[in-house]
Image (tube, rainbow, N blue to C red):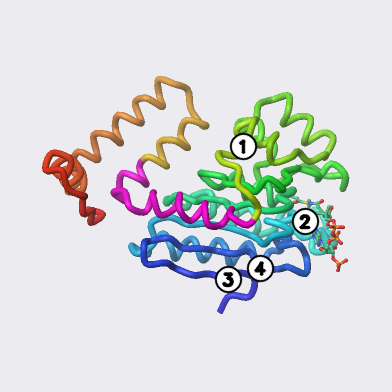
């Protein structure tokens, strides 16, 4: 029984996960983060799930780590904190994640956005890493992923001033792939997720893996990794099905094999 998340799996292979702590603007306390990691672990094993949408509510995607919870931790508490393990499990989720962002995506909320493969945002969304205002710095990848997402100058401005940026600025900088009207964000994210869920699952998961690798490695190693994945997919039934369906002018029926 989940306490901090609302979940629903749709017939077309999309799992919707809604962060649900409205009284704290969906602040990511440790319980919520553990539930999210557990839910994704289960979804990774479930063939019926082919893509995941993570959303908050109209006021906030998530306003960061839970500051009240953080107040109780000393250095040893932070050292033994289970949160980095939860974050690692979220980062290791092998299927595509689409973030549907309305309102605030701050601190850990912005870091969760950056764990998504695709970000669809409402025009009223705000993205920021305000940790500096608390005398700390981002602790769940915010410095490293933000600089890769928006470049050094804007990332440094956001992390060093703590000031958020608008959805339009986030879109222009490449943090967000599409902007929507506020009441259409979730619907659009679901459409994108369904479009992905209709593709061959092994190819989708390989594509995610190879895309993420681009952030970790230099070009020639990344190209070699891509080629290996491309070759591996030649051994799948779905690859033959996809090509055959094109030639026969019909829709492919993918089986994930
Ligand atoms: N943790 C705990 N509670 C939070 C929270 C957070 N991150 N953000 C908001 N809340 C709570 C507020 O305390 C408030 O609760 P009460 O009604 O019980 O007082 C409720 O949510 C509503 O918030 P506000 O009244 O503050 O709403 P607002 O519209 O006036 O302001 C806001 C919205 C600008 C987002 C403001 O809430 C805010 O600045 N929140 C903190 C943002 C932040 O600093 N996030 C970074 C956290 S640290 C982190 O994330 C570390 C990391 O990298 C892992």
Residue at figure coordinates x 44%, y 35% from the top left: 211
Residue under label 2: 76
Label 1, label 3: how many angstroms apart (C-alpha)? 25 Å
Looking at the image, residue 170 sits to the left or right of residue 206; the answer is right
Q: Residue at the bottom extreme? A: 1
Label 2, label 3: how many angstroms apart (C-alpha)? 33 Å
Label 2 element class: helix
Label 4 element class: loop
Would you say the residues marked 3 and 4 are in contact, meaning their CB atoms lie under 8 Å apart? yes
Q: Nearer the viewer, residue 147 or 6?
A: 6
Tell me, for residue 175, which label it has, or none: 1
Mark 3 neighbour class, 10 Å CA radius: few under 14, some 14 to 19, many 20 or more: few
Tell me, for residue 6, which label it has, or none: 3
Label 2 beta carbon within 8 A of ligand 1: no
Quadrant of ligand 1 in image = bottom right
Residue at figure coordinates x 72%, y 57% from the top left: 60
Would you say the residues marked 2 and 1 are in contact, meaning their CB atoms lie under 8 Å apart? no
Label 1, label 4: how many angstroms apart (C-alpha)? 24 Å
| Residue 61 point in image, percent of width and height | 67, 56
Label 1 element class: loop
Mark nearer the N terminus (2 vs 1) = 2
Image quarter where the N terminus lies is: bottom right
Looking at the image, residue 65 sits to the left or right of residue 35; the answer is right
Would you say the residues marked 2 and 3 are in contact, meaning their CB atoms lie under 8 Å apart? no
Label 2, label 1: how many angstroms apart (C-alpha)? 34 Å
Q: Which stretch appears magenta? A: 183-206
| Residue 122 point in image, percent of width and height | 65, 48
Residue under label 4: 20
């Amino acid at each position: 029984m989940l306490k901090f998340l609302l979940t629903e799996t749709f017939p077309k292979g999309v799992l919707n996960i809604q962060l649900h702590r409205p009284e704290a603007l969906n602040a990511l306390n440790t319980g919520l983060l553990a539930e999210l990691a557990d839910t994704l672990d289960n979804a990774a094993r479930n063939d019926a799930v082919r893509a995941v949408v993570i959303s908050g509510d109209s006021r906030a995607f998530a306003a960061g780590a839970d500051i009240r919870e953080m107040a109780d931790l000393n250095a040893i508490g932070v050292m033994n904190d289970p949160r980095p393990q939860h974050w690692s499990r979220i980062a290791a989720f092998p299927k595509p994640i689409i973030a549907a962002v309305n309102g605030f995506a701050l601190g850990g909320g912005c870091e969760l956005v950056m764990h998504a493969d695709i970000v669809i945002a409402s025009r009223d969304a705000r993205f920021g890493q305000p940790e500096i205002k608390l005398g700390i710095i981002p602790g769940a990848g915010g410095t490293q992923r933000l600089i890769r997402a928006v470049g050094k100058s804007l990332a440094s401005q956001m992390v060093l001033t703590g000031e958020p940026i608008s959805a339009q600025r986030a879109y222009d900088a490449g943090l967000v792939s599409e902007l929507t009207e506020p009441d259409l964000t979730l619907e659009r994210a679901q459409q994108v997720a369904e479009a992905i869920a209709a593709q061959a699952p092994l190819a989708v998961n390989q594509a995610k893996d190879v895309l993420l690798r681009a952030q970790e490695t230099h070009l020639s190693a990344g190209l070699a990794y891509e080629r290996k994945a491309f070759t591996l997919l030649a051994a799948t039934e779905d690859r033959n099905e996809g090509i055959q369906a094109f030639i026969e002018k019909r829709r492919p029926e993918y089986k994930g094999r």
